[in-house]
Amino acid sequence: MFQNVLENVRKKCPLIHNITNYVTANDCANVVLACGASPTMADEKDEVADITAICAGLNINMGTISKPKIESMLIAGKKANELHHPIVLDPVGVGISKLRRDTAMQFLQEIQFTVIRGNVSEIKKLALGIGTEKGVDAADCITEENMDEIVAFAKVFAKETGAIVVLTGAVDIVADGQKAYCIRNGHPMMSSITGTGCQLSAMIAAYISANPENLFIAVVAAVSAMGYAGEIAYARLSELDGNATYRTYIIDAIYNMTTEMLEKGAKYEVR
């Protein structure tokens, strides 16, 4: 199914503009490099438009927002829209403060995103902010029992925002307005590392920038690849290894990932 999605990233080596958080910036840059793209991490408002213009895609991450950074994100997002470049929004912690909620709503009103990625709780907060009612009473964790309910919610939110929606958790869901992929790759130890979600958002930006004609499958490929990398990395650990080694092994697995490996290792179903 993934055809040349991974190879396109390495062949085109798209430059990805990441306005991300300082906790995970280094890991995000390394993951972009590992999958075959090239990162830049600028957030000064006087240069973000110029940098966005020379990049193939934009990743906006709200993990450590500030008012100057919010201004830069808006400038970069509008420039990317003007140039028809794909944009990923990672609304980290959107429900924990009024500033984050207001900022996320402003982003959704003023920027057209290609992909919105977050956990169920974060996406529910965004949905409530734009008036979506269907599915907002769903649990904050994705389980086999509530899968259909959350899939339906994700499809509605995707239709209302015009973005591909990625819900990450024990099972990951990638949805547009019509269909959804439920992806069962990954390992519980991934939650012991700060920023695997941030890394995934940066990786999604690289994949969609290199595959503009096949955006949905590119997102599915990125989500599957990150989860499968977590499985490969865990299998390498010795009894003396911990989460720091695991973090490195995940990046190694992304670096060594091939289409053939992903086709065999990806675990998903369509709903």
Image (cartoon, rainbow, N blue to C red):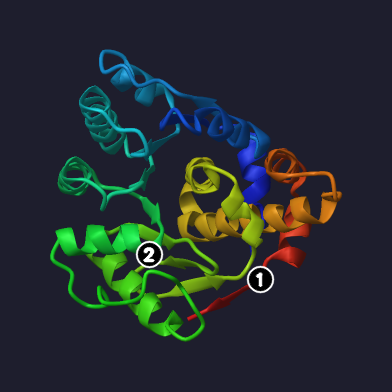
**Residue type at numbered disc 1:** Lys
Horizontal side of residue 246 vs 62, given as left or right: right
Q: CA distance from mark 1 to mark 2?
A: 20 Å
**Residue type at numbered disc 2:** Val
Horizontal side of residue 22 vs 171, given as left or right: left
- The residue singled out by tag 2 in the image is 120
Q: What residue is rendered at 78% in x and 57% in y?
A: 261
Residue 256 occupies quadrant: top right
- The residue singled out by tag 1 in the image is 267
Horizontal side of residue 70 vs 246, given as left or right: left
Residue 62 occupies quadrant: top left
Q: Out of 164 and 84, give the one closest to the viewer.
A: 164
Residue 252: give x, y in percent of width and height. Answer: 75, 40
Horizontal side of residue 85 vs 213, given as left or right: left
Q: Is residue 239 above or below residue 140?
A: above
Q: Out of 137 and 221, give the one closest to the viewer.
A: 137
Residue 237: give x, y in percent of width and height. Answer: 82, 49
